Amino acid sequence: MSVQKKSNENPEFIVSDTGNKYSRITPYIRKMAELSDRNNGIRSEMYTENKVNRGLRDLNGKGVVTGLTEISSITAKKILPDGSEVPCEGELRYRGIDVRDLVHGFLADGRLGFEETVYLLLFSELPDAARLAKFRETLCGYRTLPTSFVRDMILKAPGKDMMNVLSRSVLALYAYDDNPDDISVPNVLRQCLQLIAMFPMLSVYSYQSFQHYHRGKSLFIHLPKPGVSTAECLLQILRENGEYSALEAKILDLALVLHAEHGGGNNSTFTVHVVTSSGTDTYSTVAAALGSLKGPRHGGANVKVVRMFDDMMQNIDVEDEGQIKDYLVRLLDGKAFDGKGLIYGMGHAVYSVSDPRADILMKCAGDLSVEKGFEREYALYERVARLAPEIIAEKRKIYKGVSPNVDFYSGLVYRMLELPYELFTPIFAVARIAGWSAHRIEEIQNAGKIIRPAYVNVKKPKEYVPLAERK
């Protein structure tokens, strides 16, 4: 029943008691939002006029240098003897080591590599067998949550978005830490190792809660088996029977390695540096990074890729290359899928010729597609990977080449691993917490100032008008 208002009250302010009034956008709010839009005087050309590098990118798309790091590096261009730059095959290095060599090393030994990668990112060296075993033992020892945490923080307040529940859980862990605000390196390292160990559990338990309370599915909470890797732990606690194959664990582990870190200049890692520079605690810093990663322009892109391909397979004959080309053109014209004018999974802010992570995942996706019966879907991905760069080059003015990025294949890999969409981005976080931890520690070790960028104010001075004289 609606609340009765007096006749002289403005109906724009009336909010019905029916439904959730806190979630409703009232006519008044819509009107004020239009006012805000109307009074926004910043035009695109102002960025050029004021020499502002929008998005911390120059006119050529190159990132503005904002700091120093030893953690990872990206190479997408080679400098010729005459000083000019030309695009080259993409290269990603963790602590100076080419990620391709890192992957080849543990795969050649028949090992899983994520824990070794975490060690490398945190301590800037590869561990020997004894140190790696001790490190894995340490992570396994931290793979537990405080008493009643799952019940009180996850099951009692189930959320529809796992990234938000993950952020909330991280912030809640502050209250269980006897020394949460100590930002000395030993204490921050302890906190980071605990979060690295806990992230699979926080992510999966959030999903199980969502499945039960919002979808009416059976609720089961598995405790991690002792001694397993991060990838194995995630698969074991996610599946009702707790079972997984060696190939599934191998490929998920590889995906975690490839997502663990990326150059320091990505949005969530920059967030880590900015928030850390303020002197705040580890939990607040990681929660801020999670908020960044949640965005569809960052960590949520692989979900968009999979759903785009779903739409494609439902609406065209995927064996007909002409129909594929037409669909891709309609995507760019904003006439297909979500109307955003994007071919998701194509292109990267830095890479042009190739994304090394995508190259590695592409082969793995091909191998897995045979075992899982996804050959037809994988063939479509191959066709789009070949055709999309040509169509983008024809339709758009671009300053560099376009190639598939890691999101193009990671979503397909996760689908073949039978991972739910809701966990795609949290799994990214399970991997990237390693890089975030390394960057937080590096910022603490080397920063002396709070990161405080400048903005150019383009609003002309205005005189104050007394309330009685305003119209």
Image: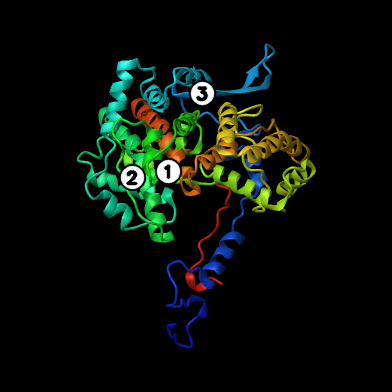
Q: Tell me if residue 285 can be seen.
A: no
Residue located at (53% from left, 21% from top): 100
- Separation of marks 1 and 3 at Cα, in angstroms: 22 Å
Q: Are marks 2 and 1 in contact (CB under 8 Å)?
A: yes
Left or right: residue 154 compared with residue 414 = left
Task: Tell me which amino acid carries mark 1.
Answer: Leu
The residue most toward the top is 81
Is residue 201 or residue 350 the one in the foreground? 201
Task: Tell me which amino acid carries mark 2.
Answer: Val
The residue most toward the bottom is 7
Is residue 290 or residue 457 the one in the foreground? 290
| First of labels 1, 3 by sequence position | 3
Q: Residues within 10 Å of mark 3 (few under 14, many from 20)?
A: some
Label number found at residue 73: 3
Indicate the position of residue 205 as horizontal and vertical percent values: 36, 48
Q: Residues within 10 Å of mark 1 (few under 14, many from 20)?
A: many
- Separation of marks 2 and 1 at Cα, in angstroms: 9 Å
Is residue 106 or residue 24 the one in the foreground? 106
| Residue beneath disc 1 | 290
Left or right: residue 458 compared with residue 451 = right
| Residue beneath disc 2 | 170
Indicate the position of residue 323 as horizontal and vertical percent values: 77, 46
Residue located at (32% from left, 53% from top): 154
